[in-house]
Image: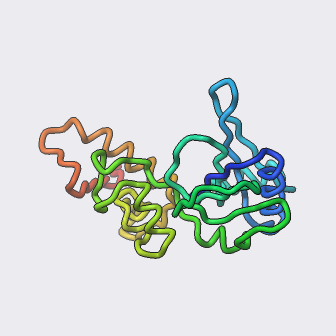
Amino acid sequence: MKCIKISGTDDLIERFISMFCKSMQNKIVCVLSDSEEGGCEVSFPGSISLLRIMQSMPPDIIFLRSDKEIAAPAVYCGSEKIVDDPLHLARYDGKELSVSPGDIFAKTFNLLPQKTADECGRCGLDCRRLAEAILSGEKREEDCFFAPGSVEVKLGGRPVELGSFPAGMIEGAVRGLVSSLKGYNETEDISVRIKPYTQ
């Protein structure tokens, strides 16, 4: 699912989220925040019902309120000067948003796996540099080895469209099961075929 890191003053972050939700009423927005106790707080702002949230999972976009380094587009909510960062997508100063909510949504992409070039590097970059390249238009989200398109499921020979969450769950489960088998090579395709029940 699409992911944006937001930072700045609490008041302006709340105002930005409210303005974004009002502008994008047909989208389910989730906000994840680091809590002072070390955990995570989750909220679904906007005037949507609990039933609609449950029917629409996963959400269309997640705003991450965190001071941690995250390889994702960022929105800064504040008036202070900030260091130039290729991941900064927009700025909200309390009066004006530098990029429209629709453009923010369009330019945002699924959260990358947050790996260094040593941990993965299959695209030739670490996740931060890939996120920068995607945001600038030099690369595509599909260039990430772990992009949702890396898992293909067919039922009765017909392809099934998967979102990033089920694709990631299937990939993690299958890789976890076969990684201990002799002959496993993480750079090769894995094929699994389940025959129909016969009675």
Q: Is residue 121 left or right of residue 133?
A: left
Residue lying farthest to the top in this orientation: 37
Residue 35 located left or right of residue 186: right
User: In the current view of this chain or complex, which residue is farthest to the front?
Assistant: 81
Quadrant where the image shows the N terminus: bottom right
Query: How many marks overall?
Result: 0
- Corner quadrant of residue 193: bottom left
Residue 189: image x %, image y %? 23, 58
Residue lying at 70% horizontally and 72% vertically, measured from the top left: 99
Q: Is residue 93 above or below residue 181?
A: below
The residue located at (73%, 64%) in the rendering is: 27
Q: For this rendering, which residue is in front, 157 or 160?
A: 160
Colouring chosen for the image of the structure: rainbow
Q: Quadrant of residue 83?
A: bottom right
- Measured as percent of width and height from the top left, residue 59 is found at 66, 55
Q: Nearer the viewer, residue 100 or 159?
A: 100
Residue in the image at 73% along x and 73% along y: 100
Q: Residue furthest left?
A: 183
Relative vertical location of residue 100 with respect to residue 44 in this rendering, above or below: below
How far across and down, in percent of the image, does residue 187 sit?
21, 54
Q: Residue at x 43, y 71 (%)?
A: 140
Q: Is residue 73 left or right of residue 116?
A: right
Q: Position of residue 26 (x, y in %)?
A: 77, 67
